[in-house]
Image (spheres, grey):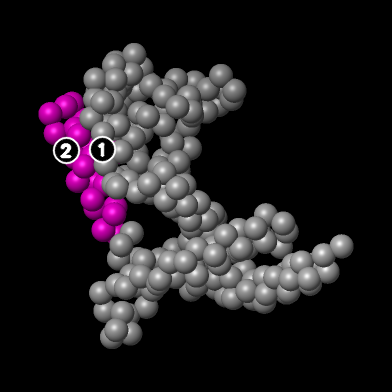
Amino acid sequence: MNYDLIQGAIQLVSEFEEARCEQPAYSLDVEGFKQWIADDLQAKTLPDPDWPGMDDGRSAESAISTLLVHMNRYAKSYSKSAIHDSSFSTQEDFIYLINLKAFGAMSKMDLIKKNIHEKPVGMQIINRLISNGWIIQRNSLRDKRSKEISITEDGLQVLANQMDNIRKATQIVSGNLTNIEKMELIRLLQKLESFHHPIYTQNMSSAELLSNAYGQINKSISEA
């Protein structure tokens, strides 16, 4: 039996448990341990990135927030270009149609929540799509007391007419990332989504949102 290997593995587990005090997102199981090893190896292989203002004390969190805002604006510009010569008014129009095509009929509020919109904005988009004849509202087959909306044949057609440009705009957003980098980015973004979505769905007021969300971070650390 290779006792040196066993001792080395025990030491790694000890380091993993210490690391979780600062990075509680790693699950306390084999999968979390494996992910920590992979991330640790990558961190030792790749140098830390630089960002504007870093030498003046600008935090990594500030850089991440700015980069996410920039990426959102880049994505919107490509989407706007994809529909510039079409019947769509905004990118939200085709995103709502894509969701209805992919997930089927649903209530207005379910569709609005799926797109992370506030109700007034979402209702404006839905009413525009109904007016254009691209979606239809009818009584729910599951609950006669409620109504559902679904995409129409005209909606499917207008979406199909523009899908080639929409796919191009989607592909451009990931830029020159390799497939491995894309998978890693998806993993990180899903991790952020898992943190933010439950907070968002609580529909807290602006007055209480920031303090409650910040409290969730501290709670995650203390429970590690």
Amino acid type, label 2: Ser
> Is residue 88 found left or right of 220 in the rendered image?
left
Task: Locate residue 54, reporting x and y percent.
Answer: 31, 79
Crowd tier of the residue under label 2, counting other residues whose Cα lies within 10 Å: few below 14, some 14–19, many 20 or above? some
Given residues 178 and 155, the one toward you in this image is 178
Amino acid type, label 1: Ala
Task: Locate residue 134, reporting x and y percent.
Answer: 30, 22
Number of numbered discs overlaid on the protein picture: 2
Q: Secondary structure at mark 1?
A: helix
- The residue segment tinted magenta is 69-92
> Is residue 170 found left or right of 219 in the rendered image?
left
In the displayed orientation, state which residue is furthest to the left: 85
- Relative to residue 189, is residue 67 depicted above or below? below
**Residue 74 colored in magenta in the image:** yes
Does residue 59 appear in the picture of this structure? Answer: yes
Task: Locate residue 215, reporting x and y percent.
Answer: 55, 73
The residue beneath circle 2 is 81
Q: Main secondary structure of the magenta part?
A: helix
Does residue 223 appear in the picture of this structure? Answer: no
> Is residue 47 found left or right of 34 in the rendered image?
left
In the displayed orientation, state which residue is furthest to the top: 153
Given residues 141 and 33, the one toward you in this image is 33
Identify which residue is drawn at 53% across, 59% down: 195
Identify which residue is drawn at 47% across, 52% down: 184
Do the residues under discs 2 and 1 have CB atoms within 8 angstroms? yes
Check the picture and name the quadrant holding the C terminus.
Answer: bottom right
Given residues 76 and 132, the one toward you in this image is 76
Task: Locate residue 111, reporting x and y percent.
Answer: 44, 36
- Distance from label 2 to label 1 (Cα)? 8 Å
- Relative to residue 55, is residue 17 depicted above or below? above
Q: Secondary structure at mark 2?
A: helix
Which of the numbered marks, if any, corresponds to residue 169?
A: 1
